[in-house]
Amino acid sequence: MFELFENELNNLKPILDQVKNASLDFLENLTEKPTYIADHSVIPADLSDAGIGAEGSLEVFRKHYEKLMVASPGPRYWGFVTGGATPAAIAGDWLTAVYDQNTQSTQGAGDVSAILEKETIRLLCQLLHLPGDFNGGFVTGATMSNFTGLAVARQWAGERSGRDVSREGVSGDLVVMAATPHSSVIKSLGMLGIGSNNVVRIQVLDGREAMDLADFEQRLIDNRHRPIIVNCSAGTVNTVDFDDIKAIAALKQKYPFWLHIDAAFGGFAACLPSQRHLLAGWEQADSITIDCHKWMNVPYDSAVSLVRKEHSRLQVSTFQNSNAPYLGDPSENFSYLNFLPENSRRFRALPAWFGLTAYGRNGFEWIVQNSIVRAQELGAYIQSSEFFELLAPVRLNVVCFRLKTARESMPAFLDQLNRRGKVFMTPTLLSGEPAIRAAFVNYRTGKEDILIAIREMEEVMRAL
């Protein structure tokens, strides 16, 4: 055996102890770590012949590259709807690397870690009050989850036109409808060959990002002779607005269409009895996107794609490895190889399983409620502020606002705010107007973090 490998296998404990200590140093001081890094300079090094070993690599990383790591899992990183990582999820993620499973099958020789993945999906559906009508699996994020659901929808649409899309390619028959689709939906349509420009945009309600149902039904009538895929928003990224899922699902009885619900983080509103009405009817969806590295607070990368079991044949025809007979008959032997895009899959279910079993329903109810309270606190400040104004009501966990005056200074304000490294927010556009967005999903965020952010915002405004 290569000498370094043998030495390190014989000294795993001190190596992992050092990694543990480095991890604790970061996590225990996370609230003081910067949310923005100004010094991007690194000194590149050539690849050595001999190598420096794991301990040597850790030393070099901490000396030269650790400074590039921002406090994105911290309590004041409010950009991109970025969650943190609970202790249980971190434990599960560490063990994911240790066990190093290629999670595929639930039976047969070799890896059968899919047994736990399917159990995790069952627990997640219980948390979100979804019935056991869905096949579910873990993918890298909302983009791949939307891609998966829309890929099966594409196969469904092709079948309605007498085509096997996975074999024959996309025709021009199908139509995709959406009011305020997330960028990952548009990206997925491009990757699927449907075309990102071929979305029929449904009008939104006045002052909202939610679908105008009258316009939607008229579009259904206009396209009634074509296969229709409908993308429904369950929590838009700017204002956490929800399409009327119950009313949209009811229209499926009159007009056949595939209902895909992008509930990347909004789906977790189902945890709270007071917010569950927002998702009424989502159990009738054909496919659903859930993002776990947002409100579930598991490490990157982790999301779930749910597709109705009645569409299993379509899902298999979309993703099956038809040119690999050694993988077995997909109708007899369940394998994620035949239900999701990736052939090689990290054991992403394990951190989620740790989180679900460690904290239970009450833990995730608390995370969602805490995020809502924090967003309301920032929103209340902005409403009373001399410097800022809300651009939309604070729905759930996102605050969308702008400067009251001197709006041309918004880019400078946000740049200076972020560069101070205490709080991080992102720019956005709402109805074509520049805005600033703060998203709350991290279980660590407390009232004191809102006060720190307010102080930082006011100091930057006074310095402009």
Image (cartoon, rainbow, N blue to C red):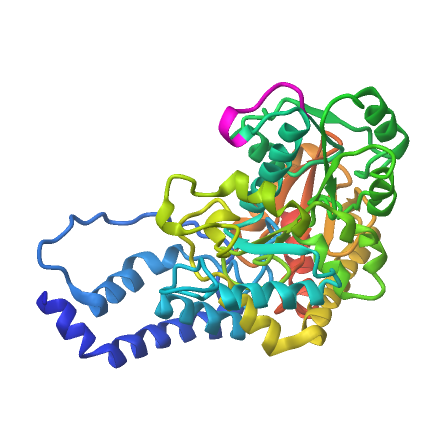
Quick check: 23 above or below 421? below
235 vs 162, left or right, is: right
Quarter-of-image position of residue 184: top right
- Magenta-colored stretch includes residue 207: no
Q: Quadrant of the C terminus?
A: top right
Residue 122, image x, y percentages: 64, 65
Q: Quadrant of the N terminus?
A: bottom left
Q: Residue at x 70, y 73 (%)?
A: 361
- Magenta-colored stretch includes residue 170: yes
Q: Residue at x 32, y 48 (%)?
A: 41
Number of numbered tags placed on the structure image? 0
Quick check: 275 above or below 162? below
Residue 372, image x, y percentages: 76, 61
- The one nearer the camera, 434 or 299, is 299
Quarter-of-image position of residue 407: top right
- The one nearer the camera, 156 or 40, is 156
Q: Residue at x 69, y 50 (%)?
A: 263
Residue extending farthest to the right is 214
Q: Is residue 462 visible?
A: no
Q: Residue at x 60, y 55 (%)?
A: 136
Which range is magenta?
166-174
- The one nearer the camera, 356 or 163, is 163
Q: Is residue 389 visible?
A: yes
174 vs 333, left or right, is: right
Main secondary structure type of the part rendered in magenta: loop
Residue 183, image x, y percentages: 61, 36
189 vs 219, left or right, is: left
318 vs 222, left or right, is: left
Quarter-of-image position of residue 25: bottom left
Residue 173, image x, y percentages: 66, 20
Quick check: 40 above or below 67? above
